[in-house]
Amino acid sequence: MEGRSRKSLKVKVLAPAKVNVFLSVGPRRPDGLHNLRSVMQSVSLCDAITIERSPTLTVDVVPAGGAPRDDSNLAVRAAQIFPTFDSEHRVAISIEKQIPMSAGLGGGSADAAATLVGLNRLWVGRRSRKALEEIAADLGADVPFCIRGGTAVASGTGANLSTVPCPKPIWWVVGISGAQLSTADVYREFDRLGGGELEDCSTVIDALAHGDTQRLASSIKNNLERAAISLAPQIEVGRDSLVAAGALRVILAGSGPTWLGLARDERHAFLVAERGRGAFKKVRVAHSLVARPRRLAATEL
């Protein structure tokens, strides 16, 4: 029956970060939102979410200060809107943070998606991936993609997803500055600077499908970059450092301030990371996850 607990008392879910291989944002709509066209990938930089039954809804974050513990945390809001949430279906959520906050890597969205997947495993009456994506859409534009994972094109306000084949791992050098940028602030600055137009991403899709890294390098882009640099001009140092270190192309991660350096392969990625690390608080090497549509997996403990 719906609402009865499973034998498992605890589940653990990995929550991969996402990168925007391509991000084109259109003008501000009358409702205040923006249409976009984005190619997104799950990558191997992950948070870990552990969920267990509890008398009250609580959240713990490691390291301390890694994310809020109240309902401004998307993982808490995911638990609150999950259909079984009531006085008999409360959970304790533990988040081990590796994805930095406000970095353009979708850490909050990834945690929310992992929470939904974990709750779906913890309580009887499992919902389909599509049903979880529909619930996720109420939490933010990136959360449905984080449920699906893999590589996909997002359109509209971000919730319309189409899977993209990506048979070859794509290697990224992730330059984390330690600065933070609010997504809302970046979009406001984007509008103030004149906005932008939606652009075609078919060349990126074709390059991913054929594993053509050089062609991919010539076609990736993010038109929020100008707005992010306008708000935080100091982050240009990081971009220039990855270019000098030999990245094939460097683009902003989401709304920033993290930079993504595209590498030819694993060896090249670690070489670029070593050469460019002086400009960042942290540098990580990450690769795209699996060549087929990926669902987050929950492990019963």
Image (tube, grey):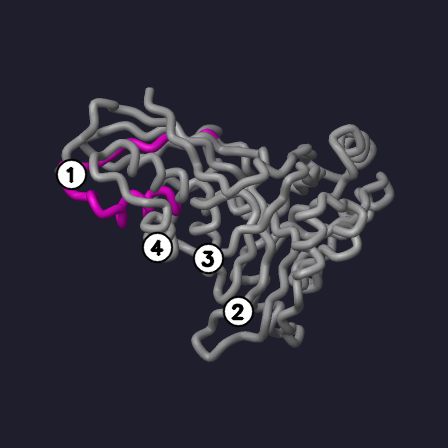
Residue at the extreme front of the image, as rendered: 210
Residue 142 higher or lower than 292, as above or below: below
Mark 3 — residue? 141
Mark 2 — residue? 35
Q: Nearer the viewer, mark 3 or mark 4?
A: 4
Mark 1 — residue? 3
Q: Nearer the viewer, mark 4 or mark 2?
A: 4
Location of residue 104 in the rendering, given as x and y in whole percent from the top left corner: 58, 49
Residue at the extreme top of the image, as rendered: 301
First to last magenta residue range? 73-96
Say which element carries label 4.
Answer: helix
Mark 4 and mark 2: Cα distance apart in space: 18 Å
Verify CB contact (< 8 Å) between mark 3 and mark 4: no
Q: What's the residue type where badge 4 is placed?
A: Glu
Q: What's the residue type where badge 3 is placed?
A: Ala
Residue 134's disc number:
4
Marked residue nearer the N-terminal end (1 or 3) = 1
Quadrant showing the C terminus = top left
Q: Identify the residue at image location x=40%, y=44%.
A: 112
Location of residue 129 in the rendering, given as x and y in whole percent from the top left corner: 37, 45
Say which element carries label 1.
Answer: loop
Marked residue nearer the N-terminal end (2 or 1) = 1
Q: Is residue 285 magenta?
A: no
Say which element carries label 2.
Answer: strand
Marked residue nearer the N-terminal end (4 or 2) = 2
How busy is the neighbourhood of tag 4: few (under 14 within 10 Å), some, or many (20 plus)? some
